Amino acid sequence: MDYFAENIKKAIRTVPDWPKPGVQFRDITTVLQDRTAFRKLIDAFVHRYHGHEIDAVAAVDARGFIIGSALAYELNASLVLIRKKGKLPFDTLVEDYELEYGTASVELHKDAFKPGDKVVLVDDLIATGGTMLAASRLIRRIGAEIFEVSAMIDLPDLGGSEKLRADNLKVYTVCSFEGD
């Protein structure tokens, strides 16, 4: 485990049996509250993408906004918000995706990117991959190129990162929690 991963993983609080029995909830608020851990988190992403001429950081509603805004600033890139349906005020594209019990939707302004823009898609964690897959489809529909899909946490046992790779997306996460 590298320097960033070890420090970030230690700062994440695990809340057992929340929001339901059997779930090990990975609470990122403890990383955000710890100024050193938060700085290391953002540094991990900045070091990863520095020098790659990223045009935009697309951040997924809502915790992805925290990482995405700091990363966009540091990379001198634009910040694009991918929101839950009904939250954006202009012309949008909408993408539905499956949840464990039903469906959800994300949306993006139609003019969020120019064709060919190089984009980093970011969220707090990758679980089943549904939200990130839907967000990537929106970005691709506009004609932008997804440089990489990234998150603070990967939950590999839920299969999301593998689904993203199967869709020809590069995936980067700072740390992962396996087996629970």
Image (cartoon, rainbow, N blue to C red):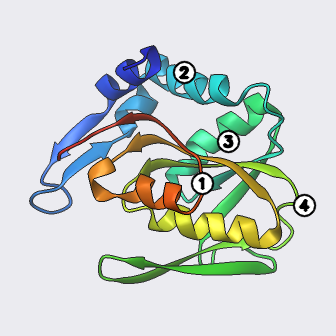
Q: Residues within 10 Å of mark 4 (few under 14, many from 20)?
A: few
Give yes or no for contact between labels 3 and 2 (Cβ–Cβ under 8 Å).
Answer: no
**Where does residue 166 sit, x and y in percent of width and height?**
50, 60
For the residues labelled 3 and 4, the Cα–Cα distance comes to 19 Å
Nearest the camera: 20 or 171? Answer: 171
Residue picked out by circle 4: 114
For the residues labelled 2 and 4, the Cα–Cα distance comes to 31 Å
**Where does residue 41 sit, x and y in percent of width and height?**
51, 27
| 107 left or right, relative to 29 | right
Q: Is residue 97 above or below residue 39?
A: below
Residue picked out by circle 2: 39
Of label 3 and label 4, which has the lower sequence position? 3
Q: Amino acid at mark 4?
A: Lys
Q: Amino acid at mark 2?
A: Arg
The N terminus sits in image quarter: top left
| 150 left or right, relative to 50 | left
As helix, strand or loop, the secondary structure at mark 3 comes to helix
For the residues labelled 1 and 4, the Cα–Cα distance comes to 19 Å
- Comparing marks 3 and 4, which lies closer to the viewer? 4
At horizontal 17% and vertical 47% (from top left) the residue drawn is 180
Residue picked out by circle 1: 169
Q: Quadrant of residue 70?
A: top right
Q: Residues within 10 Å of mark 3 (few under 14, many from 20)?
A: many
Q: Amino acid at mark 3?
A: Ser
Of label 2 and label 1, which has the lower sequence position? 2
Nearest the camera: 57 or 91? Answer: 57
